[in-house]
Amino acid sequence: MTVLAVQDLGVRIGARTIVEGVSFEVAREQTVGIVGESGSGKTMTVLAATGLLDAPGARVSGTSTLGGDEPVQLVGARPAVLRGVHGSRIGFVFQDPGTSLNPLLTLERQITESLETHRRVTRREAQARALELLDAVGIPDPQTRLHAYPHQLSGGQRQRVMIAIALACDPELVIADEPTTALDVTTQAQIIELVHTLQRDFGTAVVWISHDLGVIGQVADEVAVLRDGTVVEQAPILDVFDHPRQEYTRDLLAARPVLDVAGPHPISDAEPLLDVDGLDVSFTVSTPVGRSTVHAVKDVSFAIRRGTTLGLVGESGSGKSTVAAALTGLVTPDRGSATLAGADILGVKRSEVRALRRRIGLVFQDPFSSLNPRSRVQTSIAEPLGVHKLVDGTAAQRTRVAELLEMVGLPADFAQRYPHELSGGQRQRVSIARALAAEPDLLILDEATASLDVSVQARVLDLLARLQDELGLAYLLIGHDLAVIRRLSHDVLVMRDGAVVEHRPAEELFAAPEHDYTRALLAAVPPVRPRAAT
Amino acid sequence: MTTTETTRVSSWRLLARNPVTAISAAVLLAVVVVAVFANLIAPHGINDVDVPDALQPPSGGHWFGTDELGRDVLSRVLVATQASMRIAVVSVAFAVVVGVTVGVLAGYRGGWLDTVLMRVVDVMFAFPVLLLALAVVAILGPGVTTTILAIGIVYTPIFARVARASTLGVRTEPYVAVSRAMGTPEHVILRRHILPNIAGPLIVQTSLSLAFAILSEAALSFLGLGIQPPQPSLGRMIFDSQGFVTMAWWMAVFPGAAIVVIVLAFNLLGDGLRDVLDPKQRTIAEARRAQR
């Protein structure tokens, strides 16, 4: 039975066509996946199809019919009709569970809100339903949690609550817009399982939006691949994976980081470059009930050899970024030592700081905020040149910046652009060029490709591999995506709650993980083949 | 790549697109020109006493009429506007320099420096504006320099607050962390990364503060604590007109109108600048326009 039928949907904002000719149907117990890179119009499509689109000047064409006993046309419906449908017959789960919940309301209030709006239930009945839902989405000790506030839950638990809210009125359809993108891999795997179970129990139809084909492969029965607002390929999941008909789909599949790729060639004769021993970092944080200490990094030791990559893996809160911050002087460790080619990094004298900083480059995750929006690319890349007085005169500086841009595969005239005139991948290349400007020995890449589209990520990873070969750079590659880590790392260190869980050569670790946690991380990575194939 | 053309709409063009803002800017430009050349434009001397011609209504010879001593009101308004603008600009400049320095240092360094500086700012905030100004004038005696200092001190804490709040937002940006990690000296980080990125709210605040500075100067002069006679000032002119309001309305209305026009123009320009410079407001403003 068809729950939602979308026909020839289009969205135009002013003269621009954002979405064009999108059609799909989703039936009971079925999941339709919509996959595409950023800006492909995935979110616009479902917002328009459900009447939630609130962009100024947007015009929606086509039809979107919510089926069942009382079919409702959602495109162009009056606000009163839409209010009756949203929350009641269509539930929504959005990407960021941190901001989608109201921080001032208890979970009970948030779950019962739509119940009290749509189903004339008593307070007591609503409370009973909320308890039932919290239990169904797997929140431990639901009775107590009912009166908890969002900040008392972890990210994964918050997303479970979001799902509970979406399911509160027993909707026919749930729209899930990147529901696992902000979560750790192990949590992502749990949420995917949860949705499967709930779908089986309640028969809900799901439209699942994601940029990640791996996730879509785990959840969807049918997939629509979106590019620039049009569907390039639409087929059952297995067909898309096994017989992609379009070049673009093939590229997406190929660019997707998967675990069974070969890592870099092992290097055995490299001399040691960075040596970290017994690193210990703790922070004092002020809370309403007084000061408390967070032990972020506990007794971490590792070494990185010249020309090799150490992959530092961990979930959010594992302390992996704090290690990077300690090595670059952004936080002061309590204990431990770190030497770069024999020179002490942590206990360094003020006068020698700058010379040492020069040898460690840093690239952050977010290409949107790691460049000063008010500086041209030229200024950003030239900053380390000026700080370390590496070139004399503007002409020499210009030449060097052009050289660096060429090194990261960008045209020299990009020097005159501002960050907002670049795409995410281009910005990340500029960040890498800036990190390379002072000719460092070691690059710290903190989730450097995590917010890029898969196709862009693949190219940036290629670039990093090439630069390592050409310049003999060592990388400290910090990430949560084991497939990305696998691609570049010679050695891997797994962290959890600030401590080292497992630290071995990459080949061995991926072939035979020793620790349970490492195994759990590996198991949570979406497999190459979609779930339907097994 | 494709975003290049669409996002390059400059702030100036956005500013010009809003008619209210554009008109405010034009009015202010005119006021500035008039103020700068006040002495040349003024048809009569500001202190040309002509008793037989006293309290004449607006006419071809005296567009704004004459006061109780037969002095030309138009000439006096022009010169008074010049004085008001000069005091407002210099005092706000003082407030910007001191306030931003304090705010940026407090926000960027944090710790005890932040605590100390901000408590001082809190104390300054606790005084009513005019009372604080009165205190400064009482200590240093009335006059132009004192007025500038008084208004400047009064507006310093506002800039310190705005600068500190914006700095707190910017200092945790990854590009600042990258810069620190590469060993960039602090003053370079402040100049290159912090200041340009907190400029937006500060420019808006400057425009709004100029409006209030004009008002404060008028109030101080009205009370006899600002510009001293026989130098004309807008506030003093209104004070002097009190006894003649029923028979010579022009003595109060024209200086009052000058204050209203300048203050309103600065306020509206401030609002317009906020729309343009604050990206969040910018989207909202554009959205509203698109819906029309």
Image (spheres, coloured by chain):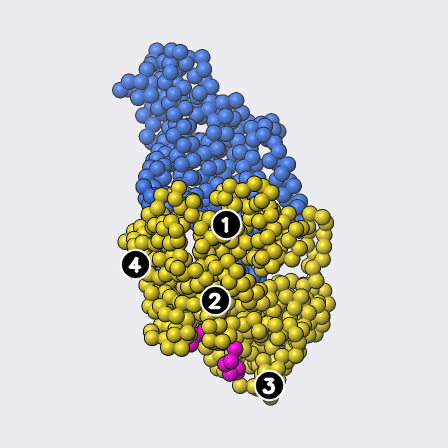
Q: CA distance from mark 2 to mark 1?
A: 22 Å
Q: Residue at x 52, y 22 (%)?
A: B224
Give residue B269's position: percent from left, percent from top.
40, 39
Query: For this rendering, which residue is in front, A249 or A56?
Result: A249
Q: Are marks 2 and 1 on the same chain?
A: yes
> Which subunit holds the residue at mark 2?
A
Three-letter code, disc 2 = Val
Q: Earlier in the sequence, mark 4 or mark 1?
A: 4
Query: For this rendering, which residue is in front, A427 or A483?
Result: A483
Residue A270 marker: 3
Label pair 4/1, CB-CB below 8 angstroms: no
Three-letter code, disc 1 = Cys
In the picture of the structure, the residue carrying the numbered disc 4 is A8
> Which subunit holds the residue at mark 1?
A
Between tags 4 and 3, which lies in front? 4
Magenta span covers which residues?
A254-264
State the SS at label 3: loop
In the picture of the structure, the residue carrying the numbered disc 2 is A219
Three-letter code, disc 3 = Ala
Label pair 3/2, CB-CB below 8 angstroms: no
State the SS at label 2: helix
Query: For this rendering, which residue is in front, B192 or B223?
Result: B192
Q: Are marks 2 and 4 on the same chain?
A: yes
Chain corresponding to blue in the figure: B
> Which subunit holds the residue at mark 3?
A
Query: For this rendering, which residue is in front, A224 or B82?
Result: A224
Q: Is residue B40 magenta?
A: no
